[in-house]
Amino acid sequence: MDKAEKIAFKQQLKRWALDGIGHRIAASREAIDQAQQAANQEEKSSAGDKYETGRAMGHLQKDMHARQLAESLKELAALHSVQTDVLYPAAGPGAFVQAEGIAFFIAAGLGRQQHEGETILFLSPHAPLAKLLQNKKPGDSIFFQSKNVTILEIF
């Protein structure tokens, strides 16, 4: 891959991550709406405790999804700040790290993903593994999944 292809590849990964986080945000918003509707639809019955329990459960669900939404929005903002139009000599935010048998993209915590037939581990820059990779260069090794893995390329 030449310089332009590497940058285009990282930008494609970033767009893919933005789409993934966008789907998370949409799902969280939908779940919040559904939880609110469920809480609002609980009808008062002769068993008042059942009514109160149903409403409380709806509010707990709404709160949980609201926290997930807040985390996704924070991750989205962090991802927007990641620069993918730069080729990096060492691992850090915005870097694509190709190692033996696995690749890492340090931009957003989406976990292990399949992208165009390749397994790529999308890491938040704040994740412990991203911190372990920080400032590593091609030829350096890390201990990953119970074995030493050599970094082959970083861009």
Image (cartoon, rainbow, N blue to C red):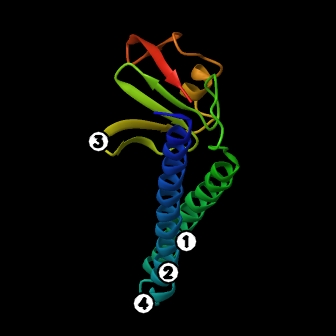
Depicted 85 relative to depicted 45: above or below: above
* Circle nearer the N terminus (4, 2): 2
Please state if 120 lies on the left or on the right of 19 as rendered. Answer: left
Residues at circles 4 and 2 in contact by the CB criterion of under 8 Å: no
* Circle nearer the N terminus (2, 1): 2
Nearer to us in this view, 1 or 60: 1
Mark 3: amino acid: Gly
* Circle nearer the N terminus (4, 1): 4
Give the distance between the C-alpha atoms of the residues marked 4 and 1, in whole angstroms: 19 Å
Number of other residues with Cα within 10 Å of mark 3, as a class: few under 14, some 14 to 19, many 20 or more: few
Residue 39, disc = 2
Give the distance between the C-alpha atoms of the residues marked 1 and 3, in whole angstroms: 41 Å
| Residue 21 coordinates in the image, percent (x, y) | 52, 57
* Circle nearer the N terminus (3, 2): 2
- The quarter of the rendered structure image containing the C terminus is top right
Residue that label 3 marks: 117
Residue 59, disc = 1
